[in-house]
Image (spheres, rainbow, N blue to C red):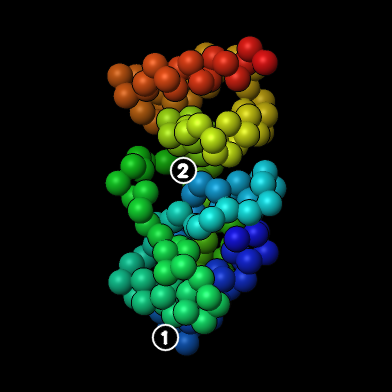
């Protein structure tokens, strides 16, 4: 999904919520944020998010998927078990749907902690480092430790961050 497609489907979600007279809230993460906020990539395969009211929005997600030929999990909350408390800001304030995104430091922490080979993660982390104006690995580790206990930061994550600054 491109940024324009994500925006279109979120607008459709707003329309569905308005038709049902429901106010909804969604916070998006991952590739969708990198597409919409940072113009970091042309597309993402799905939209990772948390949303409420969750049961009502799940029904609407399926309806939008069927109408647009999307996978049923085009908008999903599979990452909810991995989130920690973090600041966020409004990206879209629609009539019946508020769409939030995490602040860039939290996005950096999430992306660095979950970085996988053969994905956009390395590019995403580099972009977020630049957005935040970070100049050294220690600055990145300070952000990681703001959200995650030091013992949760794997050696692979440490090496990943250090290698980014060696290039």
Instruction: Examine the rendered structure and indicate whether residue 164 appears above or below residue 83.
Output: above
- Farthest-out residue, bottom: 19
The residue lying at 44 percent from left, 22 percent from top is: 157
Instruction: Examine the rendered structure and indicate whether residue 149 appears above or below residue 109.
Output: above
Depth check: give the residue in front, 53 or 2: 2
Secondary structure at badge 2 equals: loop
The residue lying at 42 percent from left, 86 percent from top is: 20
Q: Report the residue marked by disc 1.
A: 20
Quarter of the image where the C terminus is located: top right
Residue 11: x percent and y percent?
58, 73
Q: Report the residue marked by disc 2.
A: 87
- Farthest-out residue, front: 118
Left or right, 150 with respect to 141, comes to left
Quarter of the image where the N terminus is located: bottom right
Instruction: Examine the rendered structure and indicate whether residue 79 appears above or below residue 104.
Output: below
The residue lying at 54 percent from left, 35 percent from top is: 118
Left or right, 64 with respect to 132, comes to left
Residue 37: x percent and y percent?
64, 49
Left or right, 20 with respect to 125, comes to left
Secondary structure at badge 1 equals: loop
**Around disc 2, counting alpha carbons within 10 Å, would you say few (fewer than 14), some (14 to 19), or many (20 or more)?**
few
């Amino acid at each position: 999904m491109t940024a324009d497609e994500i925006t279109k489907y979120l607008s459709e979600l707003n329309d569905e919520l308005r038709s049902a007279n429901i106010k909804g809230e969604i916070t998006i993460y991952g590739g969708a944020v990198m597409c919409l906020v940072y113009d970091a990539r042309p597309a993402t395969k799905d939209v990772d998010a948390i949303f409420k009211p969750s049961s009502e929005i799940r029904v609407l997600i399926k309806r939008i998927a069927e109408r647009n030929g999307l996978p049923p999990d085009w908008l999903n909350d599979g990452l909810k078990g991995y989130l920690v408390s973090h600041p966020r800001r409004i990206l879209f304030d629609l009539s019946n749907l508020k769409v939030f995104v995490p602040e860039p430091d939290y996005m950096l922490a999430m992306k660095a902690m979950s970085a996988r080979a053969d994905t956009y993660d390395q590019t995403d982390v580099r972009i977020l480092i630049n957005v935040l104006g970070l100049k050294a690995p220690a600055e990145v580790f300070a952000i990681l430790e703001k959200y995650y206990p030091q013992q949760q930061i794997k050696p692979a994550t440490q090496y990943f961050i250090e290698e980014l600054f060696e290039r």
